[in-house]
Image (tube, rainbow, N blue to C red):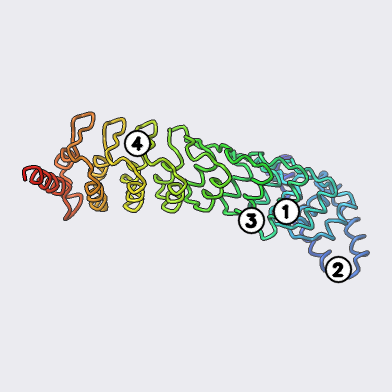
C-alpha cells in the first residue's frame, strides 16, 4: 500500500519526536559537554534535512521546556532553535514550561523573546497553561507572564479566562493575584445559562472561590439567562457550603427566576433538607408561587421521594398554606391524592400528613 504525503509526514513527525527524546536523554548523560554539543549540532543538521524540515532543534526545545532542562534549552536557543516554534498541538516551549511550573525555563524563554500571546490549538495562552497542573511554582510563573503584559482577559476555547481557570482549580492565591492585577471579577463564561464567575463557583460548590469573588466585589444579585442569581444556582446543585456563604453575604432568598421559581422551590426539588431550612431561616417566602402557581409545598408533594417527608413537615412547621391552589386549581392535597403518594413514600403519606395538619388547624379555630 502506497502512503500519501500526509501519512509520510505523520510518520516522520513521530520519528522526529522519538529521535529528539533519545538525543535529549543522550545529552543529559554525556560527560564531555563539548563533544555532546558537537554531535548534537551535526546530527540535528543532518536529520533536519532528512525529515522534510521538521526541526529536531525545535522539538528538543519543547522537551527541555517540559523537563526543566534550562542549560540544554539555552544551548538549543544559541544553536538556532525557535523560541516560538509550535508543536503538534500548537503549543510553544513557553506553554510547556509554564504548564509544568518551570520558572527558570520560563524566564530563559521570556528573555529570548518568547511571545506570551501565542495561543495553542485550544486557544490557550501560556497563562492558561500555567494553571493546568497546579504546580507549586505556578504563582511565580503567572507573575512572570503578567509582568510581560500577557492578556489576563484572554479566553480559551471554553470561553474561560485565567481567573476562571484559577477559581475552578482551587488556585485561590493565583486568583487573588490576578484580581489584584486587574482581572475582571464579572467576566462572563460560555455555557447555556450564562453568568459570571460567581455563578460558576457557586454551581461547583466552591465555597472559598465564592467568598473570594464576593470579597473582591462580585455582584451577588447579578442574573443569568434564566433569571437566576448565584444563590439559585448553588441551591440547584445542592452546594451546601456555597449556599451558606451566599446567604451570609445577604443573597436574596426571595428572588424568583424567569420561571417564577425561588431558591426554596429549587431546594425542595433537589431535595435538600438542610438548604431548605437555611433558606427559611434567612427569610425565604414559604408560600411563594412560580409561573404555574405552585408553591414549594406543591413541589414537595409532586416530587414524591421518601426524603420529602421531612421537607414537607419543615414547610408545614413554617406555616406553609396547605390549601393554596395552583393555576389549575389544585392544592398540595389534590396532588397527594391524585398520584397515590402512599406507595411512593413507603410508610409516609403526604395525604395523611396534610390532612392531620388541616384537622389540627380546624380544631384550633373552633376552640
Q: Which mark is residue 30?
A: 2
Picture coordinates of residue 247, whole percent (x, y) = 43, 47
- Residue 2 visible from this viewpoint: no
Where 356 falls versus 288 (above or below)?
Answer: below
Mark-to-mark CA distance, 1 and 3: 12 Å
Mark-to-mark CA distance, 4 and 2: 70 Å
Residue situated furthest bottom in the rendering: 31
Q: Nearer the viewer, mark 4 or mark 2?
A: 4
Q: Is residue 298 left or right of residue 105?
A: left
Count neighbours of disc 2 (C-alpha within 10 A) and say few if under 14, some if 14 to 19, many if 20 or more. few
Where is the N terminus found, in terms of image quarters?
Answer: top right
Count neighbours of disc 4 (C-alpha within 10 A) and say few if under 14, some if 14 to 19, many if 20 or more. many
Label located before the other in sequence (2 or 1):
2
Where 146 falls versus 38 (above or below)?
Answer: above
Q: Which residue is mark 3?
A: 133
Do callouts 4 and 3 mark residues in contact (Cβ within 8 Å)?
no
Q: Which mark is residue 130?
A: none
Where is the C terminus found, in terms of image quarters?
Answer: top left
- Residue 257 visible from this viewpoint: yes
SS at circle 4: loop
Q: Is residue 364 left or right of residue 5?
A: left
Mark-to-mark CA distance, 2 and 1: 30 Å
Q: Which residue is mark 1?
A: 141
Picture coordinates of residue 281, whole percent (x, y) = 34, 49
Where 23 falls versus 260 (above or below)?
Answer: below
Q: Which residue is mark 4?
A: 261
Q: Residue at x 82, y 69 (%)?
A: 29
Label located before the other in sequence (2 or 3):
2
SS at circle 2: loop
Label located before the other in sequence (4 or 2):
2
Amino acid at each position: 500500500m502506497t502512503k500519501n504525503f500526509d501519512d509520510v509526514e505523520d510518520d516522520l513527525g513521530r520519528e522526529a519526536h522519538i529521535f529528539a527524546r533519545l538525543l535529549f536523554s543522550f545529552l543529559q548523560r554525556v560527560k564531555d559537554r563539548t563533544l555532546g554539543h558537537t554531535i548534537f549540532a551535526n546530527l540535528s543538521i543532518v536529520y533536519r534535512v532528512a525529515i522534510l524540515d521538521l526541526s529536531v532543534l525545535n522539538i528538543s526545545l519543547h522537551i527541555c521546556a517540559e523537563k526543566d532542562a534550562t542549560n540544554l534549552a539555552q544551548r538549543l536557543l544559541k544553536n538556532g532553535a525557535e523560541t516560538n516554534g509550535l508543536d503538534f498541538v500548537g503549543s510553544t516551549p513557553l506553554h510547556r514550561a509554564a504548564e509544568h511550573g518551570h520558572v527558570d525555563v520560563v524566564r530563559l524563554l521570556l528573555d529570548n523573546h518568547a511571545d506570551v500571546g501565542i495561543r495553542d490549538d485550544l486557544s490557550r495562552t501560556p497563562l492558561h497553561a500555567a494553571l493546568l497542573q497546579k504546580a507549586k511554582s505556578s504563582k511565580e510563573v503567572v507573575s512572570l507572564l503578567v509582568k510581560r503584559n500577557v492578556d489576563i482577559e484572554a479566553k480559551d476555547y471554553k470561553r474561560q479566562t485565567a481567573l476562571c481557570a484559577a477559581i475552578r482549580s482551587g488556585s485561590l492565591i493565583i486568583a487573588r493575584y490576578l484580581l489584584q492585577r486587574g482581572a475582571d471579577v464579572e467576566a462572563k463564561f460560555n455555557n447555556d445559562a450564562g453568568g459570571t464567575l460567581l455563578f460558576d463557583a457557586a454551581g461547583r460548590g466552591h465555597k472559598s472561590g465564592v467568598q473570594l469573588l464576593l470579597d473582591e466585589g462580585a455582584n451577588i444579585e447579578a442574573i443569568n439567562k434564566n433569571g437566576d442569581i448565584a444563590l439559585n444556582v448553588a441551591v440547584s446543585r445542592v452546594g451546601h457550603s456555597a449556599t451558606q456563604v451566599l446567604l451570609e453575604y445577604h443573597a436574596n432568598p426571595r428572588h424568583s427566576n424567569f420561571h417564577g421559581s425561588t431558591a426554596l422551590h429549587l431546594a425542595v426539588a433537589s431535595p435538600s433538607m438542610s438548604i431548605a431550612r437555611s433558606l427559611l431561616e434567612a427569610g425565604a417566602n414559604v408560600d411563594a408561587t412560580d409561573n404555574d402557581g405552585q408553591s414549594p409545598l406543591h413541589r414537595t408533594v409532586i416530587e414524591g421521594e421518601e426524603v420529602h417527608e421531612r421537607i414537607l413537615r419543615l414547610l408545614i412547621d413554617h406555616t406553609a398554606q396547605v390549601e393554596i391552589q395552583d393555576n389549575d386549581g389544585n392544592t398540595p392535597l389534590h396532588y397527594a391524592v391524585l398520584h397515590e403518594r402512599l406507595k411512593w413514600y413507603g410508610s409516609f403519606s403526604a395525604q395523611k400528613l396534610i390532612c392531620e395538619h388541616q384537622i389540627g388547624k380546624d380544631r384550633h379555630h373552633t376552640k
